[in-house]
Image (cartoon, helix red, strand yellow):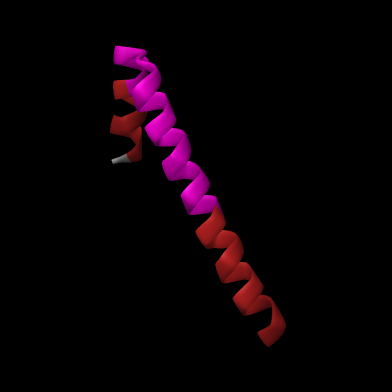
Amino acid sequence: MLIRGYAEILGSGTMISVLITLRFLLGDAKRKSLAFSVVKPLD
């Protein structure tokens, strides 16, 4: 699914699709760091 998204960005080259992907990736990173901050204290 992600690979197809990257292919679409490379194919279309539109700024909008790039921004959407960046927002998606940033949201994913935030979720991961949130999960880390929850798991870390349990160690």
Where on the picture, by quarter, is residue 35? bottom right
| Picture mark count | 0
Hey, which residue is sitting farthest bottom in the picture?
A: 42
Depicted 9 relative to depicted 35: above or below: above
Residue shown at the point (67%, 86%) measured from the top left? 42
Where on the picture, by quarter, is residue 38? bottom right
Queried whether the magenta region covers residue 13, the answer comes back as yes
Depicted 5 relative to depicted 12: above or below: below
For the C terminus, the image quarter is bottom right
In x, y percent, where is residue 26? 52, 45
Q: Is residue 43 visible?
A: no
Q: Is residue 33 left or right of residue 20?
A: right
Q: Which residues are magenta?
A: 9-29
In x, y percent, where is residue 8? 29, 22
Where on the picture, by quarter, is residue 6? top left
In x, y percent, where is residue 40? 69, 77
In x, y percent, where is residue 17? 34, 26
Q: Is most of the magenta stretch helix, strand or loop?
A: helix
Residue shown at the point (28%, 41%) measured from the top left? 1
Residue shown at the point (41%, 25%) measured from the top left? 18
